[in-house]
Image (cartoon, rainbow, N blue to C red):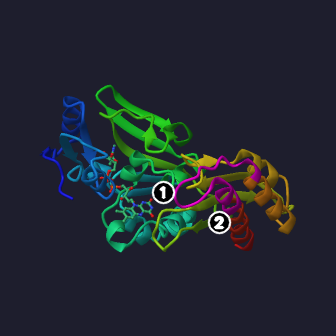
């Protein structure tokens, strides 16, 4: 389908981009275009001005320090997969991105675009919520940081303003011996998740889990942290009994949606299975 007529701008500074976005009520930033262009082709999004972020080099790059991992908003899926440092600095992030779409889309799609688009079945929103990431945005009223848990409010809905630009996503530091797992069920490889679980925990010297973070993707209308499941893991050895219990608690408590692909009870059951399998991976590491 052809796109509707629109204006296009490609600013070379962040301040120019912010001014352009603020100049039109229906202006939109464009990064990789992998979600926005299809939305425009289907007339779900109808911006009259596109503000292309491609020249904003300050939004590129992956920085790793003792403080954590900082992803510029224009970091592409490909950049994450190619960065060998992330195998230790954030293995959960890298594992999740292996499930994002296909080669061509991974060459263009960006982390900032994914977070802004806020598809509940997309991997990156689930990772930022699971990992307590902080999202930096800048607009005409200045810069602010939003906790990932406060960022998503529903399917394709977020708390940042239309004239704000996401600049950076900060994932807290990842300790070397952390246990983690990522499991996803999709109809075909590279499709959005029908259900996925992203989780990690730390293990004390007695073999008991602490600091469990369990996130679920593609089940509700936004990525969710499952606090009841985390409580079922913390303070326990992650053995078969704990895994089965965590799966049961997931299926009993997760807020699942139904759509053309699956009923809510099916998604609840699948979510439990994903959590159990992700815990098996974590315990085996
Ligand atoms: C066939 C296909 C399969 C896909 N499969 C998956 C999948 O399995 N998992 C998955 O996670 N994704 C999938 N995607 C989506 C893909 O990952 C997109 O790249 C991503 O969701 C959006 O990134 P983008 O850079 O392309 O954003 P764009 O399409 O350029 O923008 C998307 C939205 O974000 C806004 N935006 C972009 N950057 C910023 C910024 N820095 N600040 C503020 N707003 C911004 C835009 O205004 C727009 O509203 C798929 C896409 C396609 C076409």
Q: Quadrant of residue 46?
A: top left
- Above or below, 123 against 18 in this view is below
Residue on which the image places disc 1:
122
Q: Earlier in the sequence, mark 2 or mark 1?
A: 1
Residue 265 counted in the magenta span: yes
Counting from the top left corner in percent of width and height, residue 245 is at 83, 59
Measure how far apart labels 2 and 1 are at the Cα level. 17 Å
Residue on which the image places disc 2:
181
Residue at horizontal 38 percent and vertical 38 percent from the top: 137
Tag nearer the camera, 2 or 1: 1
Q: Quadrant of residue 261?
A: bottom right
Q: Residues within 10 Å of mark 2 (few under 14, many from 20)?
A: many
Counting from the top left corner in percent of width and height, residue 169 is at 44, 48
Query: In what element is the residue under mark 1?
Result: loop
| Closer-to-camera residue (251/99) | 251
Residue 144 counted in the magenta span: no
Counting from the top left corner in percent of width and height, residue 147 is at 53, 38
Which of the image's four quarters has the N terminus? bottom left
Instruction: Please tell me the numbered disc located at residue 209.
Output: none
Residue at horizontal 16 percent and vertical 44 percent from the top: 11
Q: Which residues are magenta?
A: 252-270
Q: Residues within 10 Å of mark 1 (few under 14, many from 20)?
A: many
149 to the left or right of 17: right
Query: In this orientation, does residue 179 appear?
Result: no
Residue at horizontal 58 percent and vertical 52 percent from the top: 258
Query: In this orientation, does residue 214 appear?
Result: yes
Which of the image's four quarters has the C terminus? bottom right
Query: In what element is the residue under mark 2?
Result: strand
Counting from the top left corner in percent of width and height, residue 148 is at 52, 42
109 to the left or right of 239: left
């Amino acid at each position: 389908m052809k796109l509707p007529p629109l204006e296009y701008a490609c600013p070379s500074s962040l301040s120019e981009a912010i001014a352009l976005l603020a100049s039109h009520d229906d202006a939109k930033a464009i990064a990789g275009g992998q979600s926005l262009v299809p939305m425009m082709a289907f007339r779900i999004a109808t911006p009259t001005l596109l503000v292309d972020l491609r020249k904003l080099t300050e939004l590129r790059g992956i920085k790793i320090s003792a403080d954590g991992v900082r992803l510029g908003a224009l970091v592409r899926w490909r950049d994450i997969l190619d960065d060998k440092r992330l195998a230790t600095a954030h293995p959960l992030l890298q594992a999740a991105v292996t499930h994002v779409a296909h080669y061509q889309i991974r060459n263009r799609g960006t982390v900032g675009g994914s977070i802004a688009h806020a598809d509940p079945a997309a991997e990156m929103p689930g990772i930022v919520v699971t990992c307590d990431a902080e999202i930096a945005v800048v607009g005409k009223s200045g810069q602010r940081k939003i906790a990932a848990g406060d960022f998503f409010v529903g399917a394709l809905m977020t708390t940042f303003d239309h004239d704000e630009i996401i600049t950076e996503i900060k994932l807290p530091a990842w300790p070397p011996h952390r246990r983690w797992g990522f499991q996803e069920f999709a109809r075909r490889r590279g499709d959005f998740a029908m259900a996925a679980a992203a989780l990690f925990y730390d293990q004390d010297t007695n073999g008991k889990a602490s600091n469990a973070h369990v996130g679920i993707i593609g089940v509700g209308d936004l990525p969710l942290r499952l606090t009841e499941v985390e409580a079922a893991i913390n303070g326990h050895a992650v053995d078969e009994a704990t895994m089965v219990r965590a799966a049961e608690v997931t299926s009993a408590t997760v807020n699942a949606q139904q759509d053309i692909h699956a009923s809510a009870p099916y998604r609840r059951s699948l979510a439990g299975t994903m959590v159990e399998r992700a815990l098996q991976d974590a315990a085996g590491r």
